[in-house]
Image (cartoon, rainbow, N blue to C red):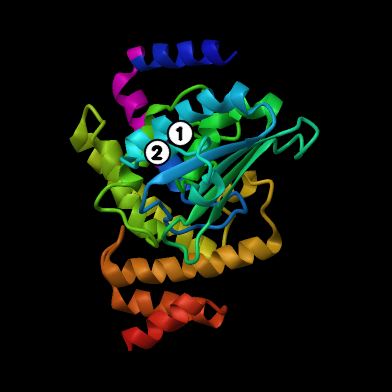
Amino acid sequence: MRRIYWGRFLSLLCWLPGVALADAFEQGLGTLWEVLWHQSGTPTRIVRWENDIRVRFRGVDVETHREHSMEALRAVTAEAGIKLIDVTNLPEAEQAANATIEILADNQLEDNQPCVTYLDFRNETRIDSATVQMRSRDAWRCDYHEAMHVMGVRGHPAGQTVLSYFPWKIDGLLPLDRVMLRAWYSSRMAGGMTPFEALPVLADQLIATAADRAAAIKARDQFFAATVQQMNAYANGQGDIPAVVKRSGKATAEGIRYGRSEMSYFLGVAYLEGATVQRDATQAVRWLERAATMGNRGAQAKLGAFR
């Protein structure tokens, strides 16, 4: 079915090149925005590695899966420009490693979550260590998905990426995955960036791949305006919740409340710094005050410094 659908999509591109390519670019922007949301349904800050990744393998059937898992890790680290070292066979592997790939028995974990990645960071900026757990029978289809998470890309967007809940591909990176990684580890990106600070970096990396850059820039600006408008409504508790939150199997009422608090803070920072929107001190203070009244410590600190 997927191959048939893709063939029809390509046929459509041939018949309606301008419209279809514009739609595909906008869908790509939507995917890049959604990747900035955690599967709990909350928007996140950028986290990434600032040093080499030293990985060790443990568990059952390690030698069956090790090379394919390393292939996935080599693919993501190459795009990011991060050095990858396999320390599994070193005598002090446990102490040397800052990333662990654990292959579990097939009766472990849940059927609806056969693989999972845990990122450890003392503050939401730099990844200190990572642990991946995968059931043996599911490791092959999980490798690239979890490798993206290892790099700090935490979202599960609906677009054409190995991170999707229903991925288009499981044995290699897709173009949008490469865009994400190149942007995530570019000199313009930094750990701790908010979604509105990160989105322009991601969008510009996507524009660099576009055939018609003028049209892509226009589409980007329209997408930014529509996204900010939607997030204004979401943070205010108005209208419908974003689709990325609806799709999340782990979204809760408390998570949505927290997400609205975070989004209020992120909007305040966006207006304060002119990230994705024009600078507007009045709007910045309004959103920071809203977030602060919801208990957001970042907003409280930012207001104290701003005043």
Mark 1 / mark 2, whichever is N-terminal: 1
Span colored in magenta: 14-30
Residue 281 appears at what percent x and percent y?
30, 77
Nearer to us of marks 1 and 2 is 2
9 or 261, nearer to the observer? 261
Q: Residues within 10 Å of mark 2 (few under 14, many from 20)?
A: some
Quadrant including the C terminus: bottom left
Residue 264 appears at what percent x and percent y?
48, 69
Residue 84, numbered circle: 2
Amino acid type at mark 1: Leu
Q: Quadrant of residue 192?
A: bottom left
Overall secondary structure of the magenta section: helix
Residue 229 appears at what percent x and percent y?
42, 58
Residue at image x 70%, y 58%? 252
Q: Residues within 10 Å of mark 1 (few under 14, many from 20)?
A: many
- Report the side of 279 relative to 54 (left or right): left
Amino acid type at mark 2: Leu
Mark 2: secondary structure:
strand
Q: Quadrant of residue 108?
A: top right
